[in-house]
Every structure is written in C-alpha cells, then in structure tokens.
C-alpha cells in the first residue's frame, strides 16, 4: 500500500511537471525569437481574447513596415547587426504602449500593433522616426528608423484575418506612394480596392473573350504622303 501511494505521488509530480512544461511550450510558441514579443500566433490569440471580452472595437490595428531595412543591414555590416537595431526599435515601441496594448513581429521587417483608439495618434507620431544606436564591431552606429504604417479601426467580432489583411493592405498602398507614410483603411479605400480587383478579374476574362480589341492609327511620311507605320492602341469593350 505504501509503495502504491508513493508511486501515485511520483506520477502526480511528473504529470504536474509535464503540465508546466506544456504550458511553457505553449507560451514560447506565441513568441517571436528575434524580439521576444508576440508572433502571428500570439497576436491571433490576443485578438480572440479581445473579441471574447467584447473589447476589440476599442482598439486600432497598425501594420508597420520598417523603411529601407536592407539599407540598414548594409550600414550595420549584415543582417545580424541590423537585427540589434530592429530589436531596439521594437523595445522602444513596446515601452510606449499602455496596459492591454500589444505588439508583435510579423516576420522580417513587419510588425503589428493593437493600440487603443485614443492612443493611436501618439503611436503614429512615434513611428515617424525612432532613434536607435548600438555598439557594433567596436563602433557606435546611430540611425533614425522610419516606418510605413497602414491602420484599421477594428470592429467588434472582426476576425484576425480581417484586421491584418485590412491594415497590411493599407500599409502596402502607403509604400507605393511618395512622401506618405500612413494610410488608413476606410470604406473609400475598400471600394477602390474592390474596384481594382474587379477590373483585374474582368480583364483576363474579357481578354479571353476577345473584348479587348486592337486599333491602329497610321503614321504618314510627309515626304511622299504614304503610310509608313502605325501606332497601336486597344479598346476594352466591357
């Protein structure tokens, strides 16, 4: 009987250790190894938590891309040294967040931030230029990291896909524009994107249906008044 009790206690102890290990493993699985902050899994779980608490609509999602990341790596002498500055960049953002606000790395030079709506302006101002410095190979390297940002005003019951897709789409549009670092995903932008996607879809369909027709405008040689070539244009009968 004593042996059985001792065996059971040993088994319970091992199960407790295993439970703690699995819990720790689950937490590690949510973290980005470079920065120590959330990865997409962690962000997804936090969005799920906010939705369960009926609080997601109190936050905006910022999708952040570091400008000229490849140039930063070259200045620092390689990716590993550039990572030192990226970690510092992430730390500065994190230290500026308030309770319940989170950030995570979305791979390479992209980050996602869930920030309260009343604090969005403050974080956007911070992201205009973040000074970082590090001792690399015996010398101090100091630069200002700028970011391109797309942001989306979350609605209650928005999915993780919706907020990331919307904010990252706005960010990609910001990257394509000159001297504009922040783009908001709103109903007007959504309509433009839907129209663009519709045009792309119809283009290939109509191309196959021969609804895109070439027209030729002749060029005339004024020396002899004869047609010598032509310009081509196409008309899309949609």
Image (cartoon, grey):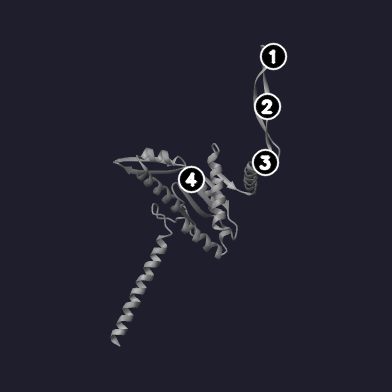
Q: Secondary structure at mark 1?
A: loop
Task: Mark 4 or mark 2: name the one nearer the start of the chain.
Answer: 4
**Quarter residue 9 falls in:** bottom left
What numbered label is drawn on residue 225?
A: 1
Task: Mark 3 or mark 2: name the one nearer the start of the chain.
Answer: 3
Q: Nearer the viewer, residue 114 or 83?
A: 83
Give the residue at mark 3. Answer: 209
Task: Mark 3 or mark 1: name the one nearer the start of the chain.
Answer: 3
| Residue 216 higher or lower than 45, as above or below | above
Disc 1 packing (10 Å; few <14; some 14–19; many ≥20): few
Q: Is residue 66 left or right of residue 212?
A: left
Disc 3 packing (10 Å; few <14; some 14–19; many ≥20): few
> Which label sits in the foreground, 1 or 4?
1
Give the residue at mark 2. Answer: 216
Residue 214 percent location from the top left of the image = 67, 31
Separation of marks 3 and 4 at Cα, in angstroms: 40 Å
């Amino acid at each position: 009987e004593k042996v059985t009790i001792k065996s059971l206690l040993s088994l319970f102890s091992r199960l407790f250790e295993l439970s703690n290990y699995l819990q720790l493993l689950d937490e590690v699985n949510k973290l980005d190894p470079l920065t120590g902050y959330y990865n997409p899994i962690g962000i997804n779980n936090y969005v799920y938590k906010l939705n369960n608490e009926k609080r997601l609509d109190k936050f905006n999602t910022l999708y952040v891309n570091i400008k000229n990341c490849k140039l930063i790596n070259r200045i620092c002498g390689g990716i590993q040294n550039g990572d030192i500055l990226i970690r510092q960049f992430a730390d500065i953002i994190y230290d500026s967040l308030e309770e319940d606000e989170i950030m995570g790395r979305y791979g390479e030079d992209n980050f996602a931030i869930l920030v309260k709506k009343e604090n969005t302006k403050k974080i956007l101002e911070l992201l205009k230029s973040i000074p970082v410095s590090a001792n690399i190979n015996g010398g101090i390297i100091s630069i200002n990291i700028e970011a391109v940002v797309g942001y989306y005003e979350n609605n209650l019951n928005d999915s993780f896909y919706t907020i990331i897709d919307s904010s990252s789409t706005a960010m990609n549009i910001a990257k394509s524009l000159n001297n504009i670092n922040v783009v908001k995903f709103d109903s007007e932008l959504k309509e433009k994107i839907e129209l663009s996607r519709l045009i792309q879809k119809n283009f290939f369909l109509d191309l196959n249906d021969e609804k895109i027709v070439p027209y030729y405008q002749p060029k005339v040689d004024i020396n002899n008044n004869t047609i010598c070539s032509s310009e081509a244009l196409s008309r899309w009968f949609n």
